[in-house]
Amino acid sequence: NGNVDFCLVNLRIIDNMGVGEGRISGQIETEYGDDVEGVMTELMSDNPAYPAYNMTNPSGEYAFENTPFSNDYVLSGQKNDDILNGVSTLDLLLIQRHVLGQEILDSPYKMIAADINNDKQVSSLDLIELRKLILGIHTEFPNNKSWKIIDASDALNIINPWNYTEKIDVSNFQDDIENANFIGVKIGDVNGSATASLQAEKEELASIIRFDFKNEVISEGEIIELELINNAEALFGFQFTLSLENFELIEVIGESVSDENFAVFGERMTMSYHSNTEISDRPVVFVLEAKTDGKLSDLLDINSEITKAEAYVGKDLEVTGIDLSENNVETDFSLYQNNPNPFNIETTIGFVLPEDGPVSLTLFDITGKTLKSYNFSGTIGYNELVINKKDLATNGMIYYTLESSGNVATKHMIVIE
């Protein structure tokens, strides 16, 4: 009959598998605002599809997409690479000043970084553990990990920094979360020098200090005392690797230097030394036995092979590089043994003069017959002269005499086929 009618109907659709999906995301930074790359974040749930993982990008960001609503979740992060990142003797110095009450660490995150043994306090025990890492004795923290990833919403302070959590709880997830943020703390790095991402620019050391040493010609089996002379103003600490390829280490001597300050690994020795007061100009002496003949400056090598070579100078503890410098202002007249000896092609004779002046070097055989004479001008300090076998026309034992400014010295050498 053409009659029509209508009514309003409310239709409610229910998803029995849950109520949709959302996104949980956040960022991980250091306390200095540096983005922390390479943190493996984990999202845990009772849902059998979990845990899920996501690595932070160069901006320190992570995200878990398509996360089902109405579940409980736990967020956390792990980063345990490059244990030495940002760790040096400077951190030892700053931690010790804190322990002694001289200069308190001024943030809860620095105190967490200083808690090397993970016992929720900063003490001399942390210094011992960190020094072992710097020297290469340890390759990981025995009771800790490289980074702690801490809930950024934790209200921490320097009075009690230990009430931190390394997770974020999400209860009954119902809506997108975009600020599940963490603070990354590099353990052992209390001065904030750690590189948090691959994109971060590494700072080059702006200056170098030099340790002077007395250069000389040494012979195999000779025991020498290598004294490093500090010429920097207000030196508070240093660390380096010393090559022992040409030496056998017998002893290390110095102010407050103990076995805890160095370690030996075959042909390498590492050293870490610091003081709360200015270090003297002669901080350390290495007693060494030479394994070969040669000029000391050619045999010595300080490098960063295991422990990075650097020093900490001035009231602001500027980080500098380290180099060796020959200190040849030796005033005692000396004639050294030629090197190599015996020789069949050429050999070098080293000597020290107390002043500039004329020099005479004469070589003669066992009968006293002169084989070769050299007359030249020498300079104060260390000098050397190369002798060629072809100029001698003989084999066997010969003698050489050095004369200069009224000083005379004689030694012998052996020429072979």
Image: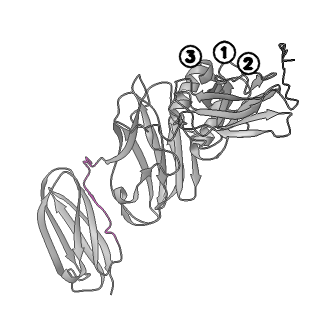
Residue 230, image x, y percentages: 37, 37
Q: Quadrant of residue 85?
A: top right
Sequence-earlier tag: 2 or 1? 1
* Span colored in magenta: 328-340
Instruction: Describe residue 18's horizontal placement relative to residue 218 as left or right.
Output: right
Tag 2 residue:
163
Residue 4 percent coordinates (x, y): 84, 15
Instruction: Say which quadrant the N terminus sits in.
Output: top right
Locate the C terminus and report the quarter of the image it occupies.
bottom left
142 or 178: which is nearer to us?
178
In the image, residue 223 above or below residue 206:
below
User: In screen coordinates, is 54 left or right of 253?
Assistant: right
Residue appearing at x 77%, y 29% in the figure: 20
Q: Tell me if I can see residue 187 in this picture.
A: no
Q: Is residue 335 on the magenta stretch?
A: yes
Considering the numbered disc 3 on the image, is that residue within a helix, a strand or a loop?
loop
Does 370 appear above or below 146? below
Total tally of numbered discs in the picture: 3
Mark with earlier residue (1, 3) = 3
Looking at the rendered structure, which numbered label has been put on residue 106? 3
What colouring method underlies this structural image?
Answer: one colour
Residue 68 image position (x, y, % from top left): 78, 31
Q: Is residue 360 above or below residue 143?
A: below
Let me know if residue 75 is in the magenta part.
no
Kind of element beneath mark 1: loop
Give amino acid for label 2.
Asn
